[in-house]
Image: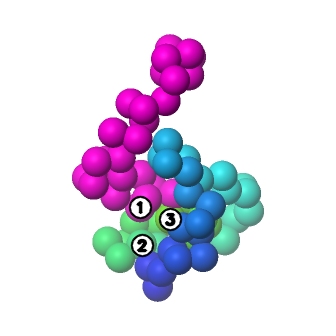
Amino acid sequence: QDDCSEFRSQFEAGGRLSCTRENAPVRDASGKQHTNKCLMCAEKFKKEAQRGGGTLQRNKLPPSERTNQ
Protein backbone atom coordinates (compact mmCIF):
# COMPACT_ATOMS: atom_id res chain seq x y z
CA GLN A 1 0.00 0.00 0.00
CA ASP A 2 2.82 2.42 0.87
CA ASP A 3 5.18 1.48 -1.97
CA CYS A 4 6.60 4.63 -3.52
CA SER A 5 9.34 3.01 -5.59
CA GLU A 6 7.78 4.22 -8.85
CA PHE A 7 8.32 7.84 -7.72
CA ARG A 8 11.79 7.56 -6.14
CA SER A 9 13.65 8.21 -9.39
CA GLN A 10 11.67 11.45 -9.84
CA PHE A 11 12.47 12.74 -6.34
CA GLU A 12 14.93 15.63 -6.44
CA ALA A 13 17.76 15.99 -3.93
CA GLY A 14 16.31 19.33 -2.85
CA GLY A 15 13.29 17.54 -1.44
CA ARG A 16 10.82 18.00 -4.27
CA LEU A 17 8.63 15.63 -6.23
CA SER A 18 6.49 17.05 -9.03
CA CYS A 19 2.99 15.58 -8.91
CA THR A 20 -0.19 15.96 -10.92
CA ARG A 21 -3.36 17.18 -9.25
CA GLU A 22 -5.44 14.14 -10.12
CA ASN A 23 -7.98 13.21 -7.49
CA ALA A 24 -7.36 9.57 -6.57
CA PRO A 25 -7.51 9.48 -2.73
CA VAL A 26 -5.13 7.10 -0.98
CA ARG A 27 -4.22 6.52 2.68
CA ASP A 28 -0.71 6.07 4.02
CA ALA A 29 0.33 3.50 6.62
CA SER A 30 -0.74 5.81 9.45
CA GLY A 31 -4.21 6.21 7.95
CA LYS A 32 -3.75 9.80 6.77
CA GLN A 33 -5.57 10.48 3.49
CA HIS A 34 -3.78 12.11 0.56
CA THR A 35 -5.15 13.47 -2.72
CA ASN A 36 -3.18 10.91 -4.74
CA LYS A 37 -0.31 8.45 -4.42
CA CYS A 38 2.30 10.85 -5.78
CA LEU A 39 1.47 13.49 -3.16
CA MET A 40 1.54 10.81 -0.45
CA CYS A 41 5.01 9.73 -1.62
CA ALA A 42 6.21 13.34 -1.86
CA GLU A 43 5.38 13.84 1.81
CA LYS A 44 7.02 10.53 2.72
CA PHE A 45 10.22 11.40 0.81
CA LYS A 46 10.35 14.85 2.38
CA LYS A 47 10.20 13.32 5.87
CA GLU A 48 12.86 10.76 4.93
CA ALA A 49 15.14 13.51 3.63
CA GLN A 50 14.73 15.54 6.83
CA ARG A 51 15.50 12.50 8.99
CA GLY A 52 18.32 11.19 6.81
CA GLY A 53 20.32 14.35 6.31
CA GLY A 54 18.39 15.75 3.38
CA THR A 55 19.06 19.23 4.75
CA LEU A 56 22.71 18.75 3.81
CA GLN A 57 21.67 18.42 0.18
CA ARG A 58 19.79 21.72 0.33
CA ASN A 59 22.75 23.49 1.90
CA LYS A 60 24.91 22.49 -1.08
CA LEU A 61 22.84 24.63 -3.45
CA PRO A 62 24.63 27.64 -4.93
CA PRO A 63 24.14 30.76 -2.79
CA SER A 64 22.01 32.35 -5.51
CA GLU A 65 19.47 29.53 -5.22
CA ARG A 66 19.53 29.48 -1.42
CA THR A 67 18.56 33.14 -1.18
CA ASN A 68 15.67 32.92 -3.65
CA GLN A 69 12.35 32.71 -1.88
Q: Main secondary structure of the magenta part?
A: helix
State how far apart marks 2 and 3 are (Cα).
9 Å
- Between marks 1 and 2 in the image, the one whose residue lies nearer the viewer: 1
State which quadrant residue 68 falls in: top right
Residue 58 position, x and y percent, is 42, 35
Residue 8 position, x and y percent, is 54, 67
- Between marks 2 and 3 in the image, the one whose residue lies nearer the viewer: 3
Q: Are marks 2 and 3 in contact (CB under 8 Å)?
A: no
Q: Are marks 1 and 2 in contact (CB under 8 Å)?
A: yes
Protein image colouring: rainbow
Using residue 15 as the reference point, say whether residue 39 is left or right of it: right
The boundaries of the magenta stretch are 42-69
State how far apart marks 1 and 2 are (Cα).
9 Å
| Sequence order check, earlier mark of 2 and 3 | 2
The label shown at residue 44 is 1
Quadrant in which the C terminus is drawn: top right
Q: Is residue 42 visible?
A: yes
State which quadrant residue 56 falls in: top left
Using residue 47 as the reference point, say whether residue 3 is left or right of it: right
Question: What residue is disc 2 on?
Answer: 28
| Sequence order check, earlier mark of 1 and 2 | 2
Q: Are marks 1 and 3 in contact (CB under 8 Å)?
A: yes
Question: What residue is disc 3 on?
Answer: 41
State how far apart marks 1 and 3 are (Cα).
5 Å
